[in-house]
Amino acid sequence: MTSRTATEATSPGQADMLLAESRTRYKAIFETVVDGIITIDERGRIDAFNPAAERIFGYTPGEVIGRNVSLLMPEPDRSAHDGYLANYLRTGHAGMIGIGREVTGRRKDGSTFPMDLAVAEESIGGRRHFNGIVRDISARKAVERRLQETLSLQSAILSSASYGIISTDAEGVIRAFNAAAEGILGYRAGEVVGQQVPSLLFHDPDELAADAAAVSAELGRPVAPGAETFAQHIATGAYEREWTYIRKDGSRVPVRLSVSALRDESGSPAGFLGIFSDVSEQRRAREQLQRFSSEMQAIFTLSPDGFVVQDEGGRLTYANPAFLALTGLAIDTLQGASEDELDRRLAALCEPGHALAPMAAMPDGASDVLHLARPRAAVLKRSVRRIQGEGGRPLGRVLYFRDISSEMELHRMKSEFLATAAHELRTPLASILGFSELLMSQDYDAETRRDLVETIHRQSSNLVGLVNELLDLARIEVRAGKDFNIRAQALLPIIDATVRHLMVPGDPRKVTLRLAGSLPPVMVDADKLEQALLNLLANAYKYSPDGGAIELATLTRQGAGGPQVGIAVTDHGIGMNADATARIGERFYRADNAGDIPGAGLGLSLVKEILEIHRGELQVESRPGEGATVILWLPAVDASTTPA
């Protein structure tokens, strides 16, 4: 048997059958395909309109078959379509035939939509037909539009963000580098984007090495600095910390960097995103705050005054060492104590007769006084200052405690001083006034008149002496020795001048001198020392009413601060007991056994003040009825350093 072609082997009946099958398959495709299929003739009239085209345009085949296809087009394409088709048929120049492109379709309801259109030409029985395949791309366009909006938004964020943004691919190549990153690091985006430049280019290598060492120690295995270390950090999520970046010009800038992984649809790392900001100002502010806090901590720690800080709920959050020393309380028992608890603690320390006001009742800026009996007797001034934040929001308050015991004692002494001084001034003034009135109102014989005048003179002298001593004391206190001319000089000439000034020709009073032949120079003001020594000698005579020898001797000793020279004045008068000896130098103090001996009790106070300015010491030895020895100890100097 010889072979034959399929055509030769096909009978007319078989050909009809194959044609029917082909038409069936075409119809099935025509009716089930998802794209719209529209067939028009050479005059633009619609010949076929498949179900997909019905869904796309909203027309039924009966509404469009035989009508011009321009029905499915919006203006201006609708009016121009027949001209396009005639031009093609006349010239053969295809504007769309055989070419797919995006066009706009018009639905039955008048709405328009984007679509892909592909047109193919065919000739059947000598007649030309055109098949158009249409796809509604509204959903795709919407996705593209949203994508474009997203990209535009992303671009706007990248461009306008105040923080730097750098993204990389999985290999570490930079893909995005926004304007803020340019401003912070000094690189232009074109210098780094798309280049084989690792993102860790900007990091301080020492910091990367230290970070890798810390991660290696944590994992118990070596981890390379850089990308491997960062991969460990972000394995469980975003990673954030401060780093030092190095700018293009080599300068350094502290940044706060947050790094997270970019993942694809499968969850695999597709790159990394780093967002960072320049924290130079924040770091400076933090350092200033830390410095201020340290300074305040040092001030509170070294302050002799007590400070207590309470939070907005009245809980104690801080108490400085001075407060703990003043009250004897322990910080571990005070920390977190409530306002009432602190009130109870302080009330327990106060004297029974002095009630403590509750702190809650004290307005801002108020002060009161606490009289403590424990841990030692003291008087504290307590002040309250409230701490407020923005808008007056309460943040707590500060309690300030100042020990005013010395001030209170000084106030008491001042009151006593004024009262005593007034009494001492009133006595001679009363005598002067009384006797002068007698002289003015009555006539007396010469002897009586002389006695009265002598009394007035004596009381006036006492008054002048008292005023001079008060002025001397006040002058020394106010000037604190600034007008003293202290220098190294020989002591014996000063003693000799003082004794000569005391002795008056014909005066039976004598001073026995027992002076060392050689004494080291002393650091003194000669005039002030002479004044102190005159006071001692005058006291020795005054408190020896029955007479007795007055002796002046010089001594030497090794004091705590170095060698000293002493001037000892000894009398054999009424003497003093131990209590009176201990009070020598107090203003207006006079021993009980002074009797009618004149004086205001300021002489030895003046001596003590002068001696303290010289950094000397006052020593008193006495027994009742046996006299007294008063020694002025003065600092000596090495004779070899004294100028000739």
Image (spheres, helix red, strand yellow):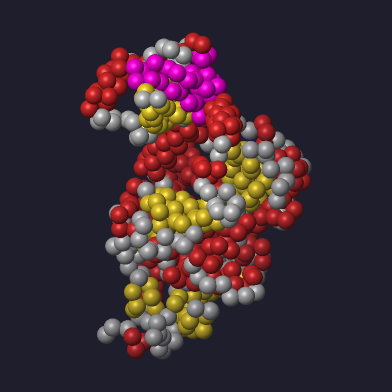
Which residue is painted at 64% across and 42% down in the image?
Answer: 311
Q: Position of residue 578 (x, y in %)?
A: 67, 66
Residue at 67%, 31% in the rendered image: 361
Q: Quadrant of the C terminus?
A: bottom left
Q: Position of residue 476 (x, y in %)?
A: 41, 58
**Image coords of residue 12 (percent x, y):** 55, 33
Report whether 545 appears left or right of 192. Answer: right
Up/down of 312 relative to 300, above or below: above
- Tell me if I can see residue 105 in this picture: yes
Instruction: Using the rendered view, name the quadrant where residue 531 is placed.
Output: bottom left
* Residue 341 percent coordinates (x, y): 75, 43
Q: Give the residue at the far front of this rendering.
A: 1
Residue 538 visible from this viewpoint? no
Most extreme residue toward the left is 91
Q: Is residue 423 above or below residue 574?
A: above
Q: For this view, does 377 lie left or right of residue 470? A: right
> Would you say 3 lies left or right of 283 here?
right
- Position of the N terminus, as image quadrant, is bottom right
The residue closer to the viewer here, 222 or 57, is: 57
Q: Which stretch appears magenta?
A: 33-61
Comparing 445 with 399, the one in front is 399
Picture residue at 36% right of the left edge, 42% below the top: 159
Based on the picture, tell me whether residue 45 belongs to the magenta stretch.
Answer: yes
Residue under the point 49% across and 10% down: 63
In front: 267, or 113? 113
Q: Is residue 247 magenta?
A: no
Choose top left, top right, bottom left or bottom right for residue 105: top left
